[in-house]
Amino acid sequence: MAVNLLIYLALMFCSQVDGQEAILHVSEGSTVREYCLVYNSSWSNISHSLTGAQSYKLVNLTSSPLCERGQLTPDFLLGQAVAVMPGECDFSTKAQVAQELGATALLVTSTDSMVTPSANDSEYRKVNIPLALMRHRDFLDILQVFSDGKEVRLYDPPAALFDASIIVMLLLAVFTVAMGGFWSGAAEKVKQTADPSADVNDEHSESSELSLYSPLKVLLFVGMMCVMLVLMYYFYRWLVYVIIVIFCLASATALYNCLDSLMTAVGFGTLSVSCRGKTLSVRSLLLAAVCITLAVIWGVYRNDDRWIWILQDLLGVAFCLNFLKTITLSNFKICVILLSLLLVYDVFFVFITPFMTSNGVSIMVQVALGPGAGGEKTDGKEVEVPGDFSPSYEKLPVVMRIPQFSSLAQNLCMTQFSILGYGDIIVPGLLVAYCHRFDVWIGNSRRIYFISCAIAYCVGLVVTFAVLLATKMGQPALLYLVPFTLLTSSILASVRKEFRQFWSGTTYHVLDDSRKPLLSDGKSGYADGVREC
């Protein structure tokens, strides 16, 4: 899944409209408000700083679409900005009429999604004043807050090349991978301490862990992921609700497991009560109530971008941690097969599928952001911003989201996020977890495999973000994370002359269902005292 999925650029040889989000600064005395604008920077020249922006009086003509001058005198709007309603004629006609009336800026209020205003080249040359779209509800707010003495300025602050949200995302991802790997290794150590013979067919082991040990199962797993992604692309409208329900259930369970294990680790006792012969744990009941409540709150307010990202990230971290603890890879061979296949899967659905889709956007980006994602390129050419602050479309809860701190204009239009998919945490995290379990198997108290692989993941993620900033283009993070983690682990095992054991995994092999367990004397398939020559 692509990291930090922002605006995915279409093919460079396609004609593009240079769309931008800007800010409408409204002031009257000490009262100041700012609102979202959408304009075409190749058509309208707007200042990049507030201090350099010209100040206008704002005239309300929203009772008219301003498609013709009518009874208005030529100097009626001299030196002023004018707000009008959309419709009945194109933007170019409205702007030309406003120019004839002496207006210095045109604001078109919109009740629908705001798409970059455009025209043909001949119309561009006829318009010399700034033209921008704003939300109609924002204009109503201006009328309610300010009197007729208000002044407006239009400006487009340049976006920062680097946003601090990337650092927060980096720390969150590395923490999750490291803690998930640590938890997996710690569980393996407890299992060995409790039962040195470590019978993998033990009922408790089967209920708490699921091991991927067969290449065929890995192929089936990746194949199912491909099919599911394609189905989500074509049937997003219905399947998104299935994923939301599954996420609520899975994240609540994962959060419960994480908190319960944490309380057990710190020595927090359990208070049990008996009722009709049954014993109930008060701690378990309280934890279950809290986890279910948090999952329900997320489900109800999942589209409120102002704050729900905090709860989604909390549930997401718990989901990833529990996944890394529960799903284990039996040996390095399985790690190589799984990570390599998912690398191909990631690159294909990010870089190759744009050539196959009608709108030039990759299947991965379309599914991750949702088909109605605002603030994104539409048809590879235009910027579209929802007319409402709360998007009406549903988004998949499969990403970590951190709001960007420096995108002032973009955040006014719609909160912009740095995004990292769960797959970019879980997939390399499975290898980190395997490295920690291998440290436990060979009795390495320094945990050199675990620490080295976790550092490699951190470096790979830094490289991913560096490429993202350099190319201004969403990246398939596994393209960098998989080589860094696999090569680091392989080189370390080779240098320590433990590669064969590292490749084969633990001596506690998981047997195929078709195989029979070994007898106590080491021979299989024969009764005591009966052997073939």
Image (cartoon, grey):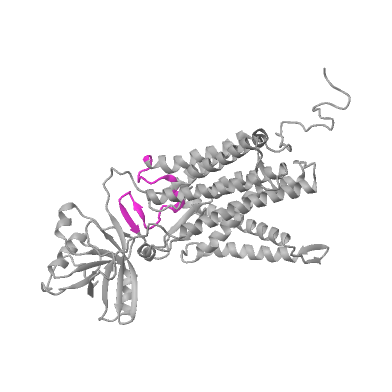
Q: Which residues are magenta?
A: 355-384
Would residue 151 be visible to someone looking at this image?
Answer: yes
**Residue 123 percent across, percent down from the top left:** 16, 56
Specify whether residue 251 is painted magenta: no
> Where residue 419 sits: x, y (%)?
47, 55
Q: Is residue 363 magenta?
A: yes
Q: Residue at x 18, y 69 (%)?
A: 104
325 and 137: which is toward the camera: 325
Of all residues shown, which one is farthest toward the top? 533
The answer to whether 433 appears left or right of 518 in the picture is left
Q: The C terminus lies in which quarter of the figure? A: top right
Q: Is residue 315 left or right of residue 504?
A: left
Q: Point out residue 484 in the picture as x, y percentages from the top left corner.
A: 53, 42
Identify the residue at image location x=19%, y=73%: 80
Relative height, residue 189 to residue 48 (above, below): above
- Residue 222 appearing in the image: no
Which of 447/438 is in front?
447
Most extreme residue toward the right is 529
Count of numbered marks = 0
Horizontal side of 342 relative to 45 (left or right) equals right
Q: Nearer the viewer, residue 225 or 454?
A: 454
Spot occupied by residue 38 in the image (x, y as percentages of width and height): 30, 62
Relative to residue 347, is residue 521 depicted above or below? above
**Residue most toward the front?**
495
Q: Residue at x 29, y 56 (%)?
A: 19
